[in-house]
Image (cartoon, helix red, strand yellow):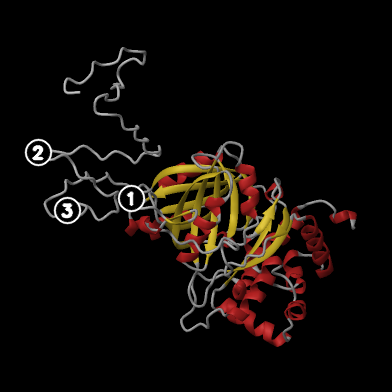
Amino acid sequence: MDSAISAMDDTDRALVHALQLAPRASWERLAPVLGTRPDTLARRWERLTASGDAWASALALRTGVHAPSMAWIEVTCAAGSAPGVGRALTGDPHALRVEHVTGGRDLLLYVVVPDLPGLYRYLSCRVQRIPGVVGTRTSMVTAVHYGPDRWRLDQLTPAQSAQLAPLGQGSRALPAAAPGAAPMTEGDRPLAMALARDARRSVASLARELDMSESTVRRRLARLEAAGALHFECVLAHVHSGWPVSATLWAEVAEHEVPECAATAAGLRETRACMSTTGPWNLVVTARLRAVEDLSRYTAELTRRLPALRVADTAVSLYVRKSTAQELDRQGRRVRCVTPDIWSDPAPGAGDETPLSPDSRAGPTGPSRPRRSEPAPPVRAGPAGPSRPHQPEPNPPARAGPTTPSRRAPPAPAPSRRAPPVPAPSRPLSAPAPLRLHHQRQHPRPPLPAHPGG
């Protein structure tokens, strides 16, 4: 490796800044702007990407002609389980961002799924079933006013940025599809997922991997860019960027003032993203800061410019595990790309989740037992025989009660398992058998006197 470019320097940062403005521009087009040779830029970029210090990726946030369902999910974990939960969620293709944060939640996720049923399935069958998760809170994204792909370094001069602006016009992520733009089809998804791993791959390389002609790849790329379906992003690891701190703010503002507030927030250098959401607060703002102490200054400046804005909560990222589908280490270097197949099943292998009604629940061996009820009192037999049971539930047959009137007959005794008593042998009338009472003590007694008529 060339020792002159073996360490991170301002030229590397200028190269990343240039690729943020023109992600797919050729080295020949970038070299005159940066004042160096094309092969030097190629070697620098190869070194940066090999070490994980920088990368370029693309996201296809489109399902047909519609935007997918996006949401912020706050996850609360049991004590000591947050690292394991974070590792499990990092591998999910639908979780584009996973970070450990401060405040009233342990993890903060940014999730993209095709539709609302997919979001329900991801929450109930995936996130909430991970061991250690004790609670979640979800805020749907209703509008993206300023996306993270528009955040830039500040390495280039204004003149250099102006020179690169025309080169990036075809690669800018548009906020919405142009009228009459062709939808993103299922056949476009492999191309989008290949660009997520490396947005600077050549057309020839993409054509070989996808088994397409180069003209087909060029045509599909142009159509997806024109439709605003591809969002390109070039990132430098935060340990080298000079902006190592990430923060999230939850704010509240009147709905009719949201566009103005979003535009003002986007004008601040630190703002990374600004989105309208559902829930207790209707605005989420993320920022990149040079130090934790700058969060107070940033919040104060935001509320000074927007007196109607009320910041309700803030959180600082302790560890960003994943950003824009890229798994990161603790220094913010890329470890690998988790292919953002947002159209796949959000909870594979979990089966269909169908809630059961109280009357359809079954026990371990079959249908549930009937509801317990008080036994019906026995009914005294009338002149025509025993009467029918009072309630439809099967009850033991009622035994005939005494003939004397009673308000309520005593319950019938349970059948005895003991054998019936054997009748005593008959004795002559003149000598009846001695009578013994059960409540008297059993001891010898003199015989009774003979019957007077005997």
Q: Gap in Å between the C-alphas at discs 2 and 1? A: 34 Å
For mark 1, give the secondary structure: loop
Q: Nearer the viewer, residue 326 or 146?
A: 326
The quadrant holding residue 254 is: bottom left
Residue appearing at x 82%, y 51% in the figure: 7
- Near mark 1 (Cα within 10 A), the count class, few <14, some 14-19 or many ≥20, is few
Q: In this view, does 297 lie above or below 177?
A: above
Mark 1 residue type: Arg
Q: Which amino acid does label 2 sit on?
A: Pro
Amino acid residing under circle 3: Gly
| Residue denoted by label 1 | 371
* Residue at the limit of the structure toward the front, as seen here: 454
Give residue 247's position: percent from left, percent from top. 55, 46
Q: Within 10 Å of the Cα at label 2, are there few (<14), some (14-19), or many (20+) other Cα atoms? A: few
Identify the element where label 2 is drawn.
loop
Q: Which quadrant: the N terminus?
A: bottom right
Q: Name the residue under label 2.
A: 405
Mark before the other along the chain sequence, 2 or 1: 1
Task: Choose between 71 and 249: the one closer to the eye.
Answer: 71
Which residue occupies the foreground of this view, 99 or 176? Answer: 99
Residue 385 shows which numbered tag? 3
In the rendered structure, the answer to whether residue 233 lies left or right of residue 213 reads: left
Q: Position of residue 75 (x, y in %)?
A: 52, 47
Residue 160, can we see it?
no
Compared across the picture, whether 332 is left or right of 177 comes to: right
Q: Is residue 149 in view from this perspective?
A: yes
Instruction: Give the number of the mark in front: 2 or 3.
Output: 3
* Mark whose residue sits in front, 2 or 1: 2
Question: What residue is drawn where x is 67% and y is 83%?
Answer: 218
